[in-house]
Image: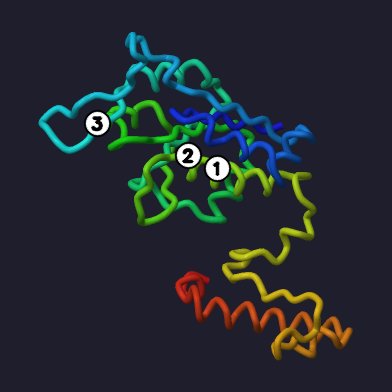
Amino acid sequence: MKKFTILTLFPDVFENFKKFSIIKRAIANKKIKLNIIDFRQFSKNKHKKVDDYQFGGGAGMIIALPSIVAAIKKYKTKNSLVLLTSPQGKPFNQAKASTLAKTKKDFIIVCGHYEGFDARILNYVDEVISMGDFVLTGGEIPAMAITEAVARLIKGVITDSSLDFESFNNKLLDYDAYTRPVEFEGHKVPAVLLSGNHKKIAEFRKANQLAKTKKYRPDLLKSK
């Protein structure tokens, strides 16, 4: 069972995340364990304050080290990989999710907030991960995204066949899928998918993957 410990100032954000879909089943089937920790409880300030002004001036408050470092030390073991969410980190992608899913390490995910952390937190984390070139108010959404992307790749969480043709496998987007009705408001299901010819269907889907990737993510083809 792989353990995810998420350090956050807003633990309530994760309540619904734990109760639905793949994550709920993964927890129930003991494939993963999810611990949500409010690191404000580690503050020794009488008001449980965790942020402070920046040395040298600057807009906004930053999270000071004592509380978050105490939380990391409390939950970190020899088997832990500490991940910090930040727009300044390395971009997260499916390949990274797969690598993390295969590691024997458990995860501690640190959710940033305000104007970020005291930069010395880098002495206490193993990797800094970004969801992309944009800024969010906090690291809770990235933490959920990392957790779900990794958890669903853990053996037994979902069926292997469900993973075979997903987007980014073989650096291609997933093929288009269709269901009933065969025609809806003049829009028809491609005839080949109704033919029963599995070879032609496979060829159609591969061509569809290539066409979609060329249109929406040509950068993936350049890296093949």
Identify the residue at the far right of this view.
Answer: 196
Q: Position of residue 38 (x, y in %)?
A: 48, 23
Q: Position of residue 154 (x, y in %)?
A: 70, 44
Q: Are marks 1 and 2 in contact (CB under 8 Å)?
A: yes
Left/right placement of residue 71 relative to residue 79 reads left
In the image, residue 148 above or below residue 200: above
Where is the N terminus found, in terms of image quarters?
top right
Query: Alpha carbon of mark 1 to alpha carbon of mark 2: how far?
Result: 6 Å
Q: Position of residue 6 (x, y in %)?
A: 53, 31
Q: Which residue: 64% across, 70% down?
A: 174
Label 3 SS = loop
Label 2 SS = helix
Query: Alpha carbon of mark 1 to alpha carbon of mark 3: how far?
Result: 24 Å
* Residue indicated by mark 3: 61
Q: Residues within 10 Å of mark 1 (few under 14, many from 20)?
A: some
Q: Which residue: 31% across, 27% down?
A: 63
Lower position in the chain sequence, tag 3 or tag 2: 3
- Three-letter amino acid code at the position of disc 1: Met
Q: Residues within 10 Å of mark 3 (few under 14, many from 20)?
A: some
- Three-letter amino acid code at the position of disc 3: Met
* Residue indicated by mark 1: 144
* Residue indicated by mark 2: 140
Instruction: Name the quadrant containing residue 12.
Output: top right
Q: Which residue: 33% across, 18% down?
A: 49
Q: Position of residue 9 (x, y in %)?
A: 43, 28
